Image (tube, rainbow, N blue to C red):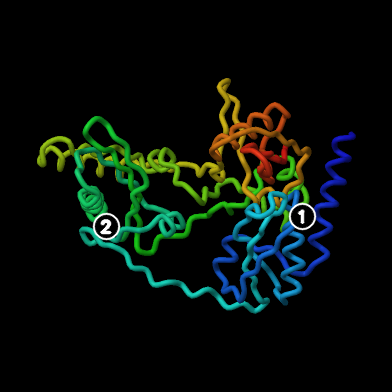
Amino acid sequence: MITLKKTIIATSVALMPFCSFAAQQLTEEQANSLQSFKNITIRGAFYTDSDYVMAMSKAADNEGAASFYITTTNISPSNDTLRIVYAKLYKSDAPKAVEQTESLRKFEGVYEYPKSKAIRLEPFNIVRIRGYFPTDYDINQAIAKEASAQGAYGFYIDSRSEIGSNLQIAAYIFKKDAPERKLQPEDAIPYDSEAGQLALAKGGDAAMQVEKPGYYSPSAFNEKYYADKFNNKVIDKTTTTTATATTAKVATSSNTETTTPVVTEPQRVTRYTVTLPDGRKIQELNDATAAKMVAFDTLKFRGYYVTDQEISYQAGKRAIEAGAKYYHIARVAHDSKGPNITVFIDLYR
């Protein structure tokens, strides 16, 4: 009961600042669809994400903005205790963002899509080929040829792996009028977290911030899911041209004749994951996601760490030992004398 009481109190305190100011924080998707009228920066001793979001909301109000989007945060180079927060500001009647004219390469009559475009579209098939491709041009040509044979308008090469002297390539292919994929927001609250369950119980706008079953990750395709969905086989191009054509024909025929419907599986947002030697895992939350959640505890540790991966591993290890499901690195402070740093982490259930 004590823990529940603390959670409810913390939730109330966290929500109050957002009601104090009119300027609302936008998601990345919302911000990208609008034209900003100004960029601003604030500095302060912000010890939690809620602190700097509240401060930015107040600053946006003073600038006459209706909303804001925090682009990045970092530590002040002149003072390790200060955090610098950058944001774009938007008017209530902000015009829609002007879509940039795309300049796409074309191979075998099929356009090569960048990831930023492909990730938003639903593929109608996946092409996986294996063979010897000495250059990227050879890879694009081979994939485009298979895509063209299936009537594709665009393709996106998602992965490549070495198998001896050969490469195995996986690419998604798209129709010209490909439907939009249902994407999870990057700052979605994990649905198995305490905050996620509270938001779902609350319903309305709060529930819309939680990861949704059946929605896709906004940062990665799930190759196994699509390979199973399209009953896909790898097309072996390591043999002769005649044999290759036969193999390709068989693979394509298999795709069309034996395709079985696959129930869309929940695909969670891809987050940085720390895995301990005993197999236990924990995921790191980004700033935007952590700002929507209430930590049940905060820890700090000090030491000498060279890379971000080392810091994340040490933070994740301590978070797991403390019984957390997720963690967020809230602040990193460098010693004024010496190479050591102090890392502050927020813990979430």
Tell me where residue 56 appears, x and y as whole percent: 72, 63
Q: Residue at x 57, y 33 (%)?
A: 274
Vertical placement of residue 292 versus 310, above or below: below
State the quadrant of the N terminus: top right
Tell me where residue 54 appears, x and y as whole percent: 76, 60
In the figure, is residue 196 to the left or right of 135?
A: right
On the image, which quarter does residue 237 sit in? top left
In the figure, is residue 157 to the left or right of 290?
A: left
Pointer 2 or 1: first along the chain:
1
Report the disc number at residue 232: none
Q: Quick one: SS at disc 1? A: helix
Name which residue type carries label 2.
Gly
State the quadrant of the C terminus: top right
> In this figure, which residue is indicated by the disc labeled 1?
51
Q: Please state which of the two labelled residues, at mark 2 or mark 1, is closer to the viewer.
A: 1
Tell me where residue 297 appears, x and y as whole percent: 78, 38
Q: Nearer the viewer, residue 162 or 200?
A: 162
> In this figure, which residue is indicated by the disc labeled 2?
151
Q: Residue at x 39, y 72 (%)?
A: 101
Q: Residue at x 65, y 63 (%)?
A: 26
On the image, which quarter does residue 330 sit in? top right
Mark 1 surroundings: few (<14), some (14-19) or many (≥20) residues within 10 A: some
Name which residue type carries label 1.
Asp
